[in-house]
Image (tube, rainbow, N blue to C red):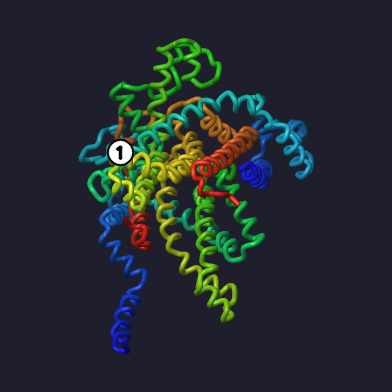
Amino acid sequence: MLKYILRRMVAAIPVLFGLSIVLFAFVHLLPGDPTRAILGQHATPEAVARIRESLGLDKPMWQQYVIYMGQLLRGDLGASIVTGAPVREDFAARFPGTIELTIAALIFAAGLGIPLGRFAARHPQQWQDGFVTVISLLGISIPIFVLGLSLQWGFGANLHWLPTSGRIDPRLNISTVTGFMLIDTVIARSPQGFFDAAKHLVLPAIALGSIPLAIITRITRASVLDVSNEDYVRTARAKGLTERRVDDRHIMRNAWLPVVTVIGLQVGGLLAGAVITETIFAWTGVGKWVVDAIQDRDYFIVQGSILIFAIIFLVVNLLVDILYAYLNPRIRYS
Amino acid sequence: MTSTVASLTPAAEARASRGLWRDAFSRMLRNKPALIGVFLIIVFVLAALLAPVLGPDGPYQTYPGASLKPPSQAHLFGTDRLARDMFTRVLYGAQISLVVGVVSVVMGLSIGVLMGALAGAFGGWVDAVMMRTVDVLLSIPGILLAIGIVAWLGRGYPQIMLAVAVTNVPIFARLLRGSLLALRESEFVIAARSIGASPGRLLVRHMMPNALTPLIVAATLALATAIIDVAGLGFLGLGPPDPRTPEWGTMLTDARSFLQRAPWLLIFPGLAISLTAIGFNMVGDGLRESLDPRMKR
């Protein structure tokens, strides 16, 4: 197992290396000059030259890449061109917001998707199955921004049930410790704050979780149906086990595998979806920050945060594979 | 004995001669969700084609004094902030989504197929290079990659198409490579190789036709995603360069500011995007079931 993990980690190195080249090329080869972003279109040539020198842009390309890699290996992601703040610190300050939202979305998606999938699989080709199929079709087809705006309109603007922007009522004055609102409110011993933060999470989590919900539902349904047709399930029933026991001990145990894999694979999509969700719900997280940075051409923020996103994606994929191997003893990685 | 064989052969031949496509087509006709999907796509294409007929004043025409009016007989979908007819704008929006969506999927498909074919047909280092490239592309969250491309290359239709195409490339490349690798070891390919078919002929004549069906399904489903992604870019302010353009996602940006006052600004473009995506997803699922009957449960 350890050997397998090590081999997978080594295999990720060329991907990260390739990614660093792609990101470097993006920043340095494509039109649009960072110095112009800092100084504006009407800067004097002298000022441009000075900034180029201070950013190291006057050196040959390969030297710039070596310097960039050296910084990366030391964990230095550079600084924002606009504010001068280190990218790593800004990222770390905003990342808990994105994680909180992503986890909430995943809990919503798996918490609803798995029971829905099992429900549909218990009544194949009947109206229950059709109903669940329609829900998952809608989940996949309705874009996050349409669903997000509709939720804002329905539950926020019309019914006033739930807040539609931000992470917590600023009047509650919760001090940031971990960056996770739900944890910070507990630390501040503010039940009111905790419920407020939880209420702020609901609509963004539903909007972000809709696509994973659809995918998890479909996979659970297919997987449960697959396993239900196995001989050992028929044997279990023939032994006279209760339907519930057959379901829990014989079907679900074997149907979990694809579901777990698919849940893991949603992480990349969730991070991408967070970009749009955070923009709609004015959520202070990494996604909105990156979109703003892209529009400001704040290269180092974009370069650094995409790299971190990619590392997270690769690490999660690795974890999913390890979990898969752990859950399924039949798999022996050679 | 002979008579049994003789009586079996014509029947078997008749069944074979109906072919994959005709079989798939007749299965498709019996698949209700797929037919609903086809209907939705036809409505979408008709909306795009008939936009100049149904909205003769064009998407930029303003109606003085009719700003943010709710749906009525004069304006079926209401009017926007600048007093333009939403019905006409949604119709013209279909043109943009149709063209940009189709072109970007075709672009993504071409690049992906080229990469997948090279990787699957040659294997070895070509395969390694292609697949690591795909891994790199897959490690960047899709919409971020698209946003990045449009932000750097500047706003415009070619840039949007390229951005959406690039996010699709890894899907097609992996899919085709997988099919080709499986086909390489199949008996009919080994047979063709053994009678001296050239690698190019093997690929084009023997392997590609058998690897097509999953690609067709994936391309149909990708059309749904492409239309959503194009609208997503528009929503984030990276749509067509002219802000007046009746692009569905761009129209939704306007809707945000008037959610309570003018919900029709959200409802109609939102429905247009969603129904079109539903249509392509239904047809894609239907095609998958029709082309591969084993999938059907």
Residue at (38% x, 39% y) in the render: A213
Q: Is residue A30 above or below residue B218?
A: above
Q: Is residue A45 left or right of residue A26?
A: right
Whether residue A334 is situated above or below residue A207 in the rendered picture: below
* Camera-nearest residue between B162 and B183: B183
Direction from residue A98 to residue B16 in the image, left or right: left
Q: How many marks?
A: 1
Image location (x, y in percent) of residue A30? 65, 45
Q: Is residue B282 left or right of residue A190?
A: left
Residue A294 in view, yes or no: yes
Q: Residue furthest front?
A: A239
Residue drawn at the location 66% of the way across and 35% of the way down = A36
Image location (x, y in percent) of residue A292: 54, 31
Question: Which one is in front, B94 or A150?
Answer: A150
Residue that lies at the very extreme toward the bottom in this rendered image? B2
| Mark 1 surroundings: few (<14), some (14-19) or many (≥20) residues within 10 A | few
Q: Which residue is mark 1?
A: A244
What is the chain letter for disc 1?
A
Image quarter in which the C terminus of chain B is found? bottom left
Q: Position of residue B279 (x, y in %)?
A: 33, 51
Picture quarter with the N terminus of chain B: bottom left
Indicate the position of residue A87 as horizontal and vertical percent values: 64, 28
- Classify A331 as above or below A147: below
